[in-house]
Image (spheres, rainbow, N blue to C red):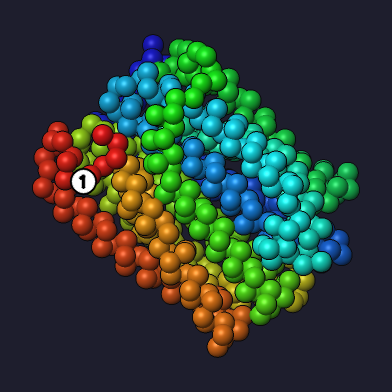
């Protein structure tokens, strides 16, 4: 029975073929996911008379959305890693327990986050860079998004687990469904029903709820290796601790993104005003399309690296990293060329306001001057997380955004005003990539000392 077999091709099939098989659906899904947010921004930016402030309000909400996503990745990414390794070790019972943990933990954490955030929503948004002009738009959008927060966590968590369990096309199909349905519902709720920015949020939550319903049905099928055990709601604290420990790296990376976004918003508001924040929101949306393509490659990398590491096939683990790093560097180089040479047409998709177009074009060009180096850094941080090397993953996750970018974003505007904020990005991109190169080189030297099948005692992995 096809559903009762583990994805053993992960340990035997040619690496290039595997990456194509697992990464292409991931790339399509993640690109679609980024377009999901881009579509919201495009429609919101063209709301009559208030679009420029609405898109600035949306940019103010980014840190809060990042914080919500961080809590989702804390649970989901750790679970994906554990499930990939457990399938490689043929430990199906534990893999199913991890799945049940994801359901319980996401509901608990998501509900708590929603309640606490709604109680203090206005002060949080002011702290994140809102003004009297942008607060109403940020509040209207986030209120709806937060009501569906727990379900959003579950949808993204289960989508990643379905992919890690050897069903990347199903995961891709669910993401494409949410994107297409959101693109259809957005103009209906925003313009036809006259709900404005709230309409975009309502469309988002509805689409994710529909995809979540299918995910729950898919993972309830007992004919599959990975399915919900009985009882479906259960919490194993030993598994939870290990899963949360593995997910700590990407969690901290998202928290760092939140802190950085807050700080950038505050600096841009100080030196450039509300429209400068909107310009950053537009530039960030454009850049994230290429980041999400890289994340799609990472999704292809994750089950392959995790499975082969669990099966102690170190040469294959090394090979999948090198191939993925080449492709991701190519992607970020394309982004660099587009943003530096052709920023104007991309910006005009989001707004026709002349001042906002000028600010966003200027910022997009400068902030991506070093983006060609980002691909290697993205895959390096994810690679250590895939192998359960928590400390290295956490350090690399924090390096680019928190340890390097924040001090530079504070110092440069003292001399260069708003332009100093934009220049901070390429400096941190290049420095963080140099650090990632050092860590990967050190790991590969340890791989070279091992033969396939040997215990990875030299590597100090936490998944042992």
The residue positioned 44% from the left and 25% from the top of the image is 236
State the residue at coordinates (86%, 61%).
Answer: 48
> In terms of depth relative to the viewer, which is nearer, 78 or 348?
78
120 relative to 130, above or below = above
Mark 1, residue position: 459
Quadrant of the rendered image containing residue 404: bottom left
Q: Residues within 10 Å of mark 1 (few under 14, many from 20)?
A: few
Write the residue at 76% across / 50% down.
Answer: 141
Quadrant in which residue 332 is drawn: bottom left
Query: Quick one: 121 or 227, which is closer to the camera?
Result: 121
Above or below 190: residue 306: above
> Can you give x and y, in whole percent of width and height, for residue 450 in the image?
12, 43
Would you say 394 lies left or right of 192 here?
left
Does 458 sit left or right of 8 as displayed? left
223 lies above or below 23 = above
Q: Quadrant of the C terminus?
A: top left
Q: Position of residue 206 (x, y in %)?
A: 72, 35
Q: Quadrant of the N terminus?
A: top left
Element at badge 1? loop
Residue 383 or residue 6, whichever sits in front: 383
Residue 176: percent from left, percent from top: 59, 38
């Amino acid at each position: 029975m096809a559903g009762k077999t583990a994805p053993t091709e992960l340990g035997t099939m040619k690496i290039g073929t595997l990456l194509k098989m697992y990464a292409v659906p991931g790339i399509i899904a993640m690109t679609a996911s980024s377009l999901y947010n881009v579509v919201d921004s495009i429609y919101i930016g063209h709301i009559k008379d208030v679009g420029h402030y609405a898109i600035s309000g949306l940019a103010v909400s980014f840190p809060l959305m990042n914080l919500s996503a961080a809590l989702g990745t804390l649970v989901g990414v750790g679970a994906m890693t554990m499930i990939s390794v457990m399938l490689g070790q043929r430990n199906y019972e534990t893999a199913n327990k991890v799945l049940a943990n994801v359901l319980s933990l996401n509901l608990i954490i998501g509900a708590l986050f929603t309640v606490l955030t709604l109680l203090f929503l206005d002060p949080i948004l002011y702290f994140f860079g809102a003004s009297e002009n942008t607060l109403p738009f940020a509040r209207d959008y986030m209120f709806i998004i937060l009501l569906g927060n727990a379900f959003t966590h579950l949808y993204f968590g289960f989508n990643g687990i379905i992919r890690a369990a050897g069903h990347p096309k199903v995961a891709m199909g669910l993401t494409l469904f949410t994107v297409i349905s959101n693109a259809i519902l957005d103009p209906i709720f925003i313009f036809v029903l006259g709900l404005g920015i709230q309409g975009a949020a309502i469309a988002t939550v509805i689409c994710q709820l529909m995809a979540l319903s299918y995910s729950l049905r898919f993972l309830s099928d007992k004919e599959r290796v990975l399915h919900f055990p009985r009882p479906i709601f259960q919490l194993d604290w030993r598994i939870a601790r290990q899963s949360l420990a593995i997910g700590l790296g990407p969690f901290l990376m998202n928290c760092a993104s939140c802190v950085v976004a807050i700080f950038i918003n505050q600096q841009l508001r100080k030196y450039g005003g509300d429209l400068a924040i909107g310009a950053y929101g537009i530039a960030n949306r454009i850049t994230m399309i290429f980041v999400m393509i890289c994340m799609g490659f990472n999704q292809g990398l994750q089950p392959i690296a995790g499975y082969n590491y669990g099966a102690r096939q170190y040469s294959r683990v090394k090979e999948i990293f090198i191939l993925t790093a080449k492709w991701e560097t190519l992607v970020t180089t394309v982004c660099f060329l587009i943003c530096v040479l052709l920023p104007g047409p991309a910006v005009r998709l989001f707004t026709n306001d002349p001042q906002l177009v000028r600010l966003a074009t200027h910022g997009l060009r400068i902030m991506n001057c070093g983006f060609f180096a980002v691909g290697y850094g993205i895959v390096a941080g994810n690679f250590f997380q895939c192998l359960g090397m928590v400390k290295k993953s956490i350090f690399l996750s924090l390096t680019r955004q928190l340890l390097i970018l924040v001090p530079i974003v504070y110092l440069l505007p003292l001399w260069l005003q708003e332009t100093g904020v934009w220049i901070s990005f390429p400096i941190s991109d290049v420095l963080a990539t140099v650090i990632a190169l050092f860590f990967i080189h050190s790991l590969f030297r340890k791989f070279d000392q091992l033969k396939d099948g040997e215990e990875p005692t030299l590597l100090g992995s936490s998944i042992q």
